[in-house]
Image (cartoon, rainbow, N blue to C red):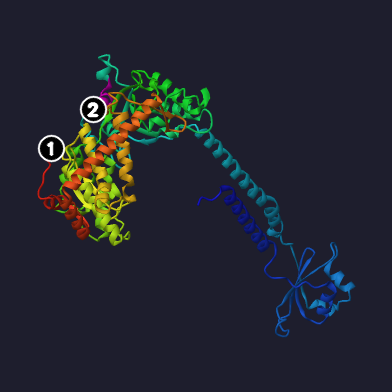
Amino acid sequence: MKTNPLIKNFVFVVLILLVVGGLFSFLYFPAQTTNEISTTQLVSEINSNKVKKIAVLGDTLEITYSDNLPAGQAGKTATSMKETGTGLTDLLINLGVNKDSLQKVDVSQQPAKQDLWSWLTPLLVFGILPLIVFGFFFWTMIRQAKSGAVQVFDFTKAKARLFGAEGHGKEKITFKDVAGLKEAKEELVEIVDFLKFPKKYLAMGAKIPRGVLLVGAAGVGKTLLARAVAGEANVPFMSVSGSEFVEMFVGVGSARVRDLFATAKKSSPSIIFIDELDAIGRHRGAGIGGGHDEREQTLNQILVEMDGFEKETGVIILAATNRPDILDPALLRPGRFDRKIVLDPPDVHDREEILKIHSKGKPLGKNINFKEIAERTPGFSGADLANVANEGALLAARQNKTQIDQKEFLEAIEKVLLGPERKSHLLSKKEKEIAAYHEAGHALVCAFMPDTEPVRKISIIARGMAAGYTLQVPSEERKMKTKTGFMSEIATLLGGCSAEKIKFGEMTTGASNDLSRASEMARKLVKEYGMSSLGLIAFGDKEEMVFLGREISEQRNYSEKIAERIDEEVDAIIKGAQKQAEVVLIKHKNLLDKVAKALIEKEIIEREEFEKLIGGVLKNNKK
């Protein structure tokens, strides 16, 4: 926990005062007290022949006793005082001293001692030291006040993280460290070439794009690709998030934008990378916050700074977002973000290369097959694949292995997809049987319906929120899907509850997620894809509240009559898919029982065993 500087300084001052007080006590008060006697007692001791020597130091008398006195008194010293201007002999005679005894005493006149500490100690303690203490205290306060003022001025400074041209942090990223994204890298090669050789383009009168917008889903490698551009060009790379510009104080965001662009121009050629541009680049004119909305002011300043670039500045802006649909049109016009580079999710070959990159430095077994892992991870982004590689290493380390085998990677895929195994979640004998028939229903409908993906694995071991699961892995990458494929997928989703009804006469709550996904898919077929009797029409206009930042409603652009027909179409699709699933399961009821019994016994069935159980039936209509 961070200590408050005020409390820290207060404690420090108190300690100084304690030290000064101790020093004063040591210097001002002597360690040994001196025996002081009166002049009358001195006369009495002279008459008793106890005094050996008297040294006169001004008005102070230092008395030394005789050596032949009893133990404890021999050689002892004492002090006494006499009146100023009076001689010692006259004083003692007037007090009745014996002259014969006085003659035996050695009386000497010495100059008075100048006691340095007698005047230096009060001067130090009461004069100089308090000035030093209070001077230090006020100096500390002034220094804090100055640092606070500096922090106030730094409040308008851009909080960009600078990766210098020398090393870009601990690790320099280049295009070799980015697998896949071939087209995106080809587009960015021109940016790199301009940063390296700007005169070649300026001599031809060419204008390099001032802004490059990287668009893609979360985890596809937008930030990594931007750093690779900086690494290839070997120029300063200033990274900042869009949310770091906006504060609750008016004008801070635009001031930080000005500071960021000014810094970039001083470091020219350089790259400014704004991550999550949609945080400040949302469409203006939402009606919330008015013209003085801080976010809009920040966006306006970015637009002005981009327009103010000269051809020779050598500053390029890279920005990343996964919501290009909500960006303000002024950002996307020519002269600002001229180029929009779309980053697609990696295909099977790219996934294989990405896995190899993220597995560097890890001890791998000889049986590692990255191609199989890539085939089992359709739809995974680069970040997901990095997570798979890391989870595989964690699983191997947990089992005290010295290397990572294929088994750990395959286990990591399911952990990333569904969550860890819940081995403590034990099902009763009846629930286990229901789960087995449910998953067997999914698998059989998938096996015998056209245009579906092959079953890779069936399990009734709980993972995450699922009591069981059936994994399908596409045999090839697909960018488009037909109505037949959608209907087969909905039938597969309803295969679980259909199997429960056929075997047990009723369905359980285990099909709730299947029903939700099937209903959503059926509604999209009608409202978005035009795959119904309503024709090639898209229904519904989705509105998003810019201020809230999420979709909260759908504006109807159709009548109540059409709404009823939409509901009827959705109902017809669901019922039609359910009937298809029931037909398949009733026709192959013996296979349903066979697969379910194998699941109850083994809990996990892989693709090869599943195809063997159903008699080697292949889906002829999947090619």
Mark 1: few/some/many CA within 10 Å (<14, 14-19, 20+): few
Residue at 31% over, 57% down: 422
* Label 1 sits on residue: 621
Residue 194, magenta (yes or no): yes
The answer to which quarter of the image holds residue 279 is top left
Q: Amino acid at mark 1?
A: Asn
Q: Nearer the viewer, residue 499 or 119?
A: 499
Q: Which residues are magenta?
A: 189-198
Outermost residue to the top: 205
> Crowding near pointer 2: few (<14 within 10 Å), some, many (20+)?
some
The rendered magenta stretch, by its main secondary structure, is classed as helix
Query: Which label belongs to residue 189?
Result: 2
Give the percent coordinates (x, y) of residue 577. Answer: 25, 39
Left or right: 514 in relation to 147? left
Residue ID at (33%, 41%): 516
Residue 589 in view in this figure: yes
Name the amino acid type tagged 2.
Val
Residue 425, percent from left and from top: 32, 59
